[in-house]
Structure formats: structure tokens, C-alpha cells
Amino acid sequence: MPDFPLRLEPRAEPSRLMSYLSPLIAVALTLLVGLLLFSALGKDPIEGFRYFFINPVRTLYGLSELLLKATPLMMCAIGLAIGFRANVWNIGAEGQFVLGAIGASGAALYFSGSDSAMLLPAMVVAGALAGAAWAAIPALLKTQFNANEILVSLMLVYVAQLLVSWLVFGPWRDPYGFGFPQTEMFHDAALLPILLDGTRLSFAFVIALAMLALGYVFMHRSYTGFKMRVAGEAAAAARYAGFSAKRMIWIGLLCGGGAAGIAGMAEVAGPMGQLTDKVSLGYGFAAIIVAFVGRLNPVGILFASLLMALLFLGGEQVQQYMNLPSSISMVFQGMLLFFLLGSDVFINYRLRIGCAASV
Amino acid sequence: MDGNLITAILFATVVAGTPLIIVALGLLVNERAGVLNLGSEGMMAMGAVVAFAVTHHTGNPWLGALAGMAAGMSASLIFGVLTLTLQANQVASGLALAIFGVGLSAFIGKPYESVALQSVPAVRIPFIADIPIIGEALYNQQAMVYLSWALFWTVLWFLYRSRAGLVLRAVGESPASAHAIGHPVVLIRYLAVLFGGAMAGLGGAFLSVFYTPMWVEGMVAGRGWIALALVVFATWRPLRVMIGAYLFGGVMITQLFIQGSGLQIDFPAQFLSSLPYWATIIVLVVISRNANTIRLNSPASLGKPYRPEA
């Protein structure tokens, strides 16, 4: 490259400080560009900031909604992080989420006469299995036929959406639902208990926290987790040590699929209370961003999912009060990941001003 | 089957394959330079919405198409800066672009969701359009269809007959060697990424302005990802991209024809609609089954960052 006044110079070793700072820099830059965006749209940026980031969490109810939205993100992201660490790129959490919702709904509808306390656990299992089964397709095709798991898992997102649409328009449609594409409302035994009276926050949040803890133990305290990290950071070393690459792919995808499936279960047995064709609001895709912004680390994912949940809620607020499409939250989410990837460069490089001293 | 139906199916197949050709050829050049941009779905969505808006305001579909290309290029520039200048991971950056582009297009497109455009008339090529059956299907088409054929010949010539194409392929195979003999690797990769973005934008513009003259959120419907799969299926060769794109066009159209034919088959419409996605998966499996096919044909440096040593 020609002599730039600013140059990137490789660091002797990656900066630990920067790896923690980089998400904060990304958040700050996203905020800054967000304020500019509001001004460019002819809206008061301070007002926009208030609706986006303050209003949603000013009340106890708002906070409970934040945790409610963060729940599926946390669940999907921790599963994805396990795969991402081993360079297993499961991009289809959105589809696995939908399959989990279908599996859990199937259990709820099949046992619609049951009052058993075992129904909810059965729904969790059904959701996890359905999500994992959906993720098993890319795992099988990757390990047996070397087919790219990114593209296969992504194609299955579209198939999953068509599948749920068929179910709620066809065999599972509520006969008394005025023709709406939705199942009947689940009965009480198939609904997750509410944690806080007067809110929609359910027991799913506790499950999500438990999943984060489990994820931590698996990634940082187990031998398999260690092997997967080695495979991700130094593929050659993992091969030399004889770690089975196929096993990593299976574990990575099944964890991701199972976790996303549980998230789908929590959605239908929680805030929705039924299966509809709009069961996922993009949680599976947003969880990819959560996993990266959270540094593929359970504690990081906890914070990142709260932040992304805030972006979802903020989008709803500005739609309601500032007459802007709620898809603005997707714009913010995408920007956040861009800035994160950009500022991550300073983990391995430092910025030098002036020309190279000697080459 | 009577001749008219064959003509109709052939016609629709060519139209459905056209955006895939345009986008996949762009990605092919992009990947031949060693850069994997997974953001094509986002770039297509950006191209589609911007082209629609510009066509709506100016009434000129060609201005719209140009604007769509510019939108795709701007989107790909973000990707370029991240991966080529800032050395970010190409997979993650591409995914970010896919999510961002789809989101931004939904945001920009909201006011245009209930707007309709006039359809662009077809261009009939004299004499050869009179050939029975195939004439009407191939030579009484949208100008963009002819453009996609021109693009194919241009890419073919560029990659295999021009010096610049040789350099581009060298950069994709071994950036270090290309750098050592004095080629500006990063610049060439930037140009390849921008070309990929422009073509993705143009493909999106074709969808929203020429194919179905309207804008709906999510209208790209996975075509950006299918185009990525097509490049793998084509083992990074332009002719196979063409063939593959029309095969996919055929799958998309056949299911529409079955759904629209009123044939009394007891098969849910959603299952038919999922056929193109299953076809993509099957195609990937068939072509990837032999690991050597992929290893020998894919550009050697695909997806790997390269930073010139001062």
C-alpha cells in the first residue's frame, strides 16, 4: 500500500484489554451513528435516544420485557457460540428455533387434555430434539458429503418457515380461530409459570441462565470444550493431536440446534401461548450478533443479549411514538456487528501515525 | 404437452434464472480474487429497494437499475473496508452485511410497500423471435435477460482471455506471489468486491423493477444465498453458473406452474415452495461429495485474509 499517514502495525501479541474494550467501542460508535441517523431522518436525536434506550427500561414492567426479549437471544447465542468457537458456522438458528416451537407445540396439542406437571419438561425435550434434528441435517451433510454447513443450515431456515406456515394454515389450525393462521391457545399445564406477577416474564429466563452456566462449564471446564476451542483457534494443532473434526461438527451443530429449539419452546409456551406463522421475530439471526458481541463467552452473551433485546424494544418504541419502521432495530443490530468487527482489528494491530520507519 | 405451454415454461424459467446469473457471476469474480462475501442476500435487498425507489420517483427503470448497482456497491464497500483494510473475518463480516442489508432495506422500503410500478415492456428481437417454441421464450424477453447473456460473455472473456483476468485469478490463487511480482493485491480485491456488490445490486434491481414490479420486505427470499451455492455448484466456472441458474429457475417455475395449474394433486403448496431450497441443498451435496472437486477448483486463498508485508 502507498504510505498512509495512519498505518496498522501488528502487535507482538493480541491485546487482552482491546478484546474487552472493543465491544464497548462498538456500542459507542453504534450510538453515535444512531444519533446521526435520527438527525438525518429529521427527528430529534435526543428524543430518539430516549425512546430507543431509556423509555423501554424506565419501569419494572419495561425491565421485565427486556429480560423476556433477552431470553431467546441468550438461549440461541450460547448454543451458537459453542459451534462458532470450533469454526462450525451454524447460521440456521432461526430455522432450528422454529422447529423447536413446532416440536413443543406438537407435544402441547397432543397432550391437550393432560394436567401433568411433566408436560412442560416434555415440551422442552420435544423442542430441543426438534431443533437438534433440524441442525443434524447440515451436520450429516457436512460430515458425510462435505456440504457447506452455512448454506445448508440457511436454506433450512426457509424450509422451516414454510413448514410452520403449512401447519398453522393446515392440520394444526385452530378450528375456532376465525381462519387465522394459528393453533388454539395452549392450556394452562402447557404454559410456563410466570416469575413476576403482572409481567410476562416466565420461568424461561431461569432456564436461559442455567443454559449459560452449562455453556460455561462445557466450554471452559470440560475436555471436549477445550478440544473444540483448540480446533477453532489452531486447526492444524487439533488435527495433529488427533481430535476428530467430525465430532466437533456434530457437537457444534447439535448444541446450537438444541438450544435454539428450547428457545422456540420458550416462545410458544411463554409470551405467545400458541404457535403462529410469525413465531420468530428474527431471534435466530440476532443471536449470531449476540454471540459475536458477547465474545463467544457466556458472561459476554448475557450482556450482549440484554443490549440486543433493548434494540428490539427500542425499535418498537420508535415505531409507536416516532413513526419510524421497527426494522430500524435490525439496522442498529447490523451496525453494532460491523463496528465490532471493525474495532476488533485493534486486538491484533495497533494504529501508528506516520510512515513506516524502516521496512 | 402443447407447444404454448413449453414456451411459457421456458420463458418463465429464463426470467427466473436471470437474477441468479447476474448475482452469481458477480460473486464468481469476487471469489476468484480470493474473497468470500456471504453478504449477497443483503446486497441484493439493498439493490432491490433502492432501484425500486429510484424507478418510482423518476419513472425510469434504467436509472433505477443503476441506482441499485450503486447501492450494492456501497454495501460491498463496507465489507471491503472491514475485510481488506481492517483484516476482519470474511465469514463474520459477510453475515453482518447480510443481516444489515436485509434490515436496512426493510427500513428504507417501508413507504414503498403499497406502491406499484409499471411493468417494463419486453424487447423483441426481429426474425429469431419467430422461431417456433423457443423464439418467443428466448428472444422476446426483458432487455435485462439479454444483458445477463452479455455479462456472461464478458466475464468469460475477462477471466480467461484478458490480462487483468489472469492477474485477478493469480491474486485468488496466491496473493503472496501476486504481491511479490508487483500486483496491488488489496486494490484488485477491492475492485472484485465492488464488482460483486454491483452485480448483486443489479440482480436485486431486476427482481423489484423488472421481474415483479413491486417491493415487499423479504422479497429476495434467499436468492442471494442460492447464488452463493450456485458458485460452489459451478465449481467457480462461468458456463456452469449459467446452466445452474437456469436449472434453479426451472425448479422455481415448475413449482409455480404446478401450483397455478389447478391440477388436483393432494400436495400442500408450502412443500412445493420449499423445492428450490431443497434443490440447493441437494446440489451442494452432489458437488461437494468429492472433496477433491472442491479443493482443486476453488480459488486457493478463498476466505483467507491477506496483508501485504509492507
Image (cartoon, coloured by chain):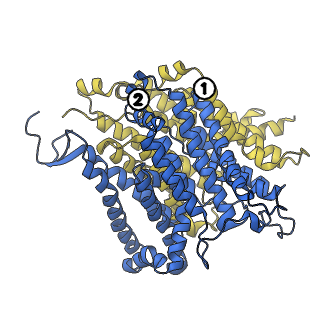
Q: Vertical placement of A328 versus A214: above or below?
A: below
Crowding at mark 2 (Cα within 10 Å: few <14, some 14-19, many 20+): some
Which residue reaches farthest right? Answer: B264
Residue B100 in the figure: left or right of residue B276: left
> Which chain does yellow denote in the image?
B
User: SS for tag 1?
Assistant: helix
Percent coordinates x, y for residue B226 in the rendering: 59, 40
Instruction: Please state which amino acid type lies under the numbered disc 2.
Output: Ala
> Which chain does blue denote in the image?
A
Percent coordinates x, y for residue A24 in the rendering: 32, 60
User: SS for tag 2?
Assistant: helix
Crowding at mark 1 (Cα within 10 Å: few <14, some 14-19, many 20+): some
Q: How many marks?
A: 2
Quarter placement of the N terminus of chain A: top left
Viewer-nearest of labels 1 and 2? 2
What's the residue at 64%, 56% (across, down)? A264
Residue B159 in the figure: left or right of residue B150: left
What's the residue at 34%, 36% (across, down)? B305
Q: Quadrant of residue A201?
A: bottom right
Q: Vertical placement of B61 versus B129: above or below?
A: below
Percent coordinates x, y for residue A37 in the rendering: 39, 69
Q: Vertical placement of A213 versus A358: above or below?
A: below
- Front residue of B24/A6: it is A6
Q: Chain of mark 2?
A: A
Instruction: Please state which amino acid type lies under the numbered disc 1.
Output: Phe
Question: Which residue does the numbered mark 2 point to in the structure image?
Answer: A235
Q: Vertical placement of B214 versus B211: above or below?
A: below
Question: Which residue does the numbered mark 1 point to in the structure image?
Answer: A145
Distance Cα–Cα, label 1 vs label 2: 20 Å
Q: Chain of mark 1?
A: A
- Front residue of B274/B59: it is B274
Marks 1/2 same chain: yes
